[in-house]
Image (cartoon, helix red, strand yellow):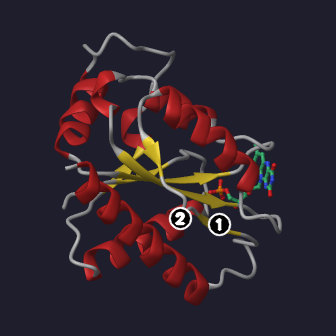
Amino acid sequence: MYIPIILGTAREGRFSEKVANLAMEIAKESGIDSEMVDIRDYRLAATDNIGNIPQAKKWAEKVNKADALVMVAPEYNHGYSGELKMFLDMLYEEYFGKPVGLCGVSMGPWGGTRGIQALKLTCLALGMHPILQAVYVPNIRDAFDEKTFGKQAKGMLEGLVKLKVAIK
Ligand SMILES: Cc1cc2nc3c(=O)[nH]c(=O)nc-3n(C[C@H](O)[C@H](O)[C@H](O)COP(=O)(O)O)c2cc1C
């Protein structure tokens, strides 16, 4: 089972990087082949959905191989990051039928729930299957509860594997 983890912000000083790294460790411990997809490595000046640019080709290769996807998305003004939207918009057909696990991150107490609701709609528009077991990480800057995160992340990964098997 190959499940890449998208780090959904390019912001300098991003706290979501810690969350994405931990999610990857947990995936590997669970026997899942995983890697970090850092959207900093796919910088775009404008929306491009033609699929010919090197960034799109590189991302398409990974999505085609992926059994499922995980997205770690910090909440920015009750949405998700603009660069994550541009990153996702590079492709379309490649996403069809992929189970996706969403992980919200916020400085505030709600764990990025509003950003995740918005991201869920985008995932549906792209033909993906967002699973019920989302992960919400509140208070990331001063009270990251790694134990709770670990439990939720394991539940999400199990949900992704289950759905992938069911789809097969
Ligand atoms: C442009 C911007 C908007 C933000 N809006 C929210 C918000 O709506 N709700 C919230 O809880 N935190 C908000 N934050 C704080 C982030 O949750 C915070 O930066 C946190 O560390 C997670 O994001 P990071 O990975 O960029 O660090 C915002 C941060 C930025 C940069």
Q: Position of residue 137 (x, y in %)?
A: 66, 69
For numbered disc 1, what is the local secondary structure? strand
Give residue 42's quadrant in the image.
top left
Image quadrant where one finds the N terminus? bottom left
Is disc 2 surrounded by few (<14), some (14 to 19) or many (20+) residues within 10 Å? some
> From what the image shows, is residue 14 above or below residue 40?
below
Q: Is residue 10 above or below residue 111?
A: above
- For label 2, the SS is loop
Name which residue lies at 30% across and 28% down: 55
Question: Where residue 66 appears, x then y in whole percent?
Answer: 23, 47
Relative vertical location of residue 78 with respect to residue 85 in this rendering, above or below: below
> Residue beneath label 2, please?
133
User: Of all residues shown, which one is farthest toward the bottom?
Assistant: 147
Residue sitting nearer the eye, 17 or 119:
119
Judge by depth and name the residue closer to the eye, 10 or 164. Answer: 164
Q: Position of residue 93 (x, y in %)?
A: 31, 23
Kindly identify the amino acid type of the residue bearing the numbered disc 1. Answer: Tyr
Q: Residue placed at 28% from the left, 29% from the top?
A: 94
* Mark 1 surroundings within 10 Å by alpha-carbon count, few (fewer than 14), some (14 through 19), many (20 or more): many
Q: Which mark is residue 136?
A: 1
Which dot, 1 or 2, sits closer to the camera? Answer: 2
- Most extreme residue toward the front is 166
